[in-house]
Amino acid sequence: MRAVTFAFMIFAALAVCLVGLACGEPDTGAVGFSLVRLKPADPILRGDHLNREFVKSASCQVFGSSDSKQTPLAEGTAPVDPLKPEENQSLEDIQAGKGYFGRIRGFLADGTTVYECAVVGPFDLTGGGKKFIQDVAILTPPAIDPDCDNFCQISADCAAGYFCPCGRDGVGLSECKQALCAPFVIGKTCAVKEDCAATLTCVISSSFIGGYCSNSCSDDSFCPDGSWCAPKALAGTSQSMCAKSCTIDADCRTAEGYSCVEINPEPSKKGCLPATP
């Protein structure tokens, strides 16, 4: 079986769920679970994820729909051993079909408390074919959802104060890489990643006084409602990041040097960014 990973960073490690080609009947597929050590690709805007100091085991599940209360079509659990470079487990003979969701959960030593998790979907499994799913973001379970049960495709699927990190509105996203409702505050003050919403990290530099909760982006679809993708927002780099949307300076943290500025190359969009890069 050739498996292709959808991966997430961990504290000098990466947890990966693989969806690939089953070697059995042509109407079935397979899902694998693997733990692979990797370093964060972007230490500024991508914080560490599944923390091996606390997470002792991780499970991978496949559901037939966005209803996480149903019995999983398949599931498996693998230990998290910081001394091993890679561990694998396969979930075989899953019926080919459409609209599947996958969930990864990292557990504490008690085996029941979820410390971190990821959800991806909807995706299809093709009998006798291959499936590529990559770059799933790990979230810290919010208090309202300690078991990571609130799957989503658009923000309307989530409770008030929460959003679906799939993109601005989920339109045209056939496969959501972060299909779990999460709290959201772009532009909030922070000192460490844990001060920010689960999907965000803390940007700290001489320009971003007081810290700035954000995440990297390549266009607006990577930024949830209430923010825009600001090109080259980090001074001296080509790195783009999500900036809190605004209309006037008063919408921003002016006391700390932030102002409402035009986001090039679209001056109709404004975001809260340091007045002096």
Image (cartoon, rainbow, N blue to C red):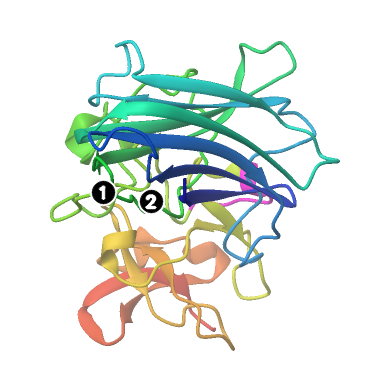
Outermost residue, right side: 83
Task: Give coordinates of residue 63: x percent, y percent.
Answer: 31, 24
Residue at 61% x, 67% y is 42
Q: Secondary structure at mark 2?
A: loop
Q: Which quadrant of the rendered structure holds the C terminus? A: bottom right
CB contact under 8 Å: marks 2 and 1: yes
Could you tell me how many numbered marks the image carries?
2
Toward which corner of the image does residue 180 lie, by quadrant?
Answer: top left
- State the residue in front, 202 or 39: 39
Magenta span contains residue 191 = yes
Is residue 216 inside the magenta stretch? no
> Where residue 47 appears, x then y in whole percent?
63, 54
Farthest residue to the left: give it: 171
Q: Nearer the viewer, mark 2 or mark 1?
A: 2
| Residue 177 in the image, given as x and y percentages of width and height | 36, 48
Taking the spot 49% from the left edge, 51% from the top edge, the residue there is: 5
Q: Which mark is residue 133?
A: 2
Circle 2: is it few (<14), some (14-19), or many (20+) Cα within 10 Å?
A: many
The magenta-colored residue range is: 188-194
Residue to which mark 1 is pinned: 175
Q: Earlier in the sequence, mark 2 or mark 1?
A: 2
Indicate the amino acid at tag 1. Answer: Glu
Helix, strand or loop at disc 1?
loop
